[in-house]
Image: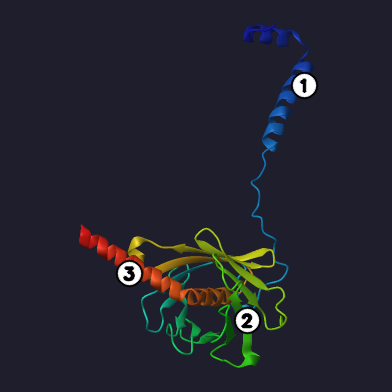
Amino acid sequence: MSFSCTETFEKQMRMPWSEVVVIESVGLATENKEEDSFVLPAPRNNKPLAEPVVVISPKFLAPYPVDLTIVKKMLKFSDGNFVVQDVNGEVIFKVEGKLFTVHNRRIVQDAVGNPIVSLKRKRVSAHGRWMAYKGDSSDPNDLLFTCKASHVIQFETEVDVFLPSNTEETNCDFKLTSANSGFTIYAGDSIIAQMQEKQTAQSVFLGKTTSTVTVFPKVDFAFIVALLVTLHETNSSYVMSTTIEAVSSIAISSLDV
């Protein structure tokens, strides 16, 4: 049985005022209950860091996420083919050293040229091991970390990072894995940084790539930059060959037009 609005109103008018108030209050309570049932979106599936991650220096810690841009000039054989900038375009780090030299050594510097960390590749290593030292040192006592490919043969990039205290290297202290045209860096089960490559046909032709990096709060962002430099150096021969191949194909295509 249904009632018209007029019949409902007349029925309410015949009811005691206290009952009408109760009906209205119940209706408001129902509406408020529906509003309170809103569920917030799920948080990022990431375990919070129990302690700050300091590998190079605590002065490179920030209480907020740090967004950096890494510009790489892949076809530049002279010094300084890496530049790291903040969100305002200010240079934070730059990298000195030449590709494919006998010493295979790179130095990450601050904006005014002070050495922050020296990166040296082990000459004989099936896993492509790199060692990182304080400043421009190569003294074993100044070792900060080492990193190497997780497997001798791998189809997706995976790098294990070890601190000097981890002499047995049974389990890595940090791990870098490739995912969705980028890389994710872990400390145990916690994500501490993520990088995304931004590559266009024009950037390939010019031999330059740009990567955006987000370093999570309380994580040594100089360490993250140094680790990504070793990643680039490990893959440099592959990057160079694919870049030259891409530039050649573009040039041939333009001749066919």
157 sits left or right of 7 in the view: left
Classify mark 2: residues with Cα within 10 Å, few (<14), some (14-19) or many (20+).
many
For image coordinates 51% across by 87% down, the residue present is 115
> Tags 1 and 3 in contact by the CB under 8 Å rule?
no
Of callouts 2 and 3, the N-terminal one: 2
Residue identifier under label 2: 145
Could you tell me the amino acid type at mark 2? Phe
Q: Is residue 216 visible?
A: no
Q: Quadrant of residue 120?
A: bottom right
Of residues 121 and 209, the one nearer the viewer is: 121
Of residues 251 and 216, the one nearer the viewer is: 251
Q: Which mark is residue 107?
A: none
Q: Secondary structure at mark 1?
A: helix
- Quadrant into which the N terminus falls: top right
Q: Secondary structure at mark 3?
A: helix
For image coordinates 35% across by 68% down, the residue present is 245
Which-is-in-front pick, marks 1 and 2?
Answer: 2
Q: CA distance from mark 1 to mark 2?
A: 71 Å
252 sits left or right of 121 in the view: left
Task: Point out residue 60 in the picture as x, y percentages from the top left corner.
Answer: 59, 76
Q: Which mark is residue 22?
A: 1
- Quadrant into which the C terminus falls: bottom left
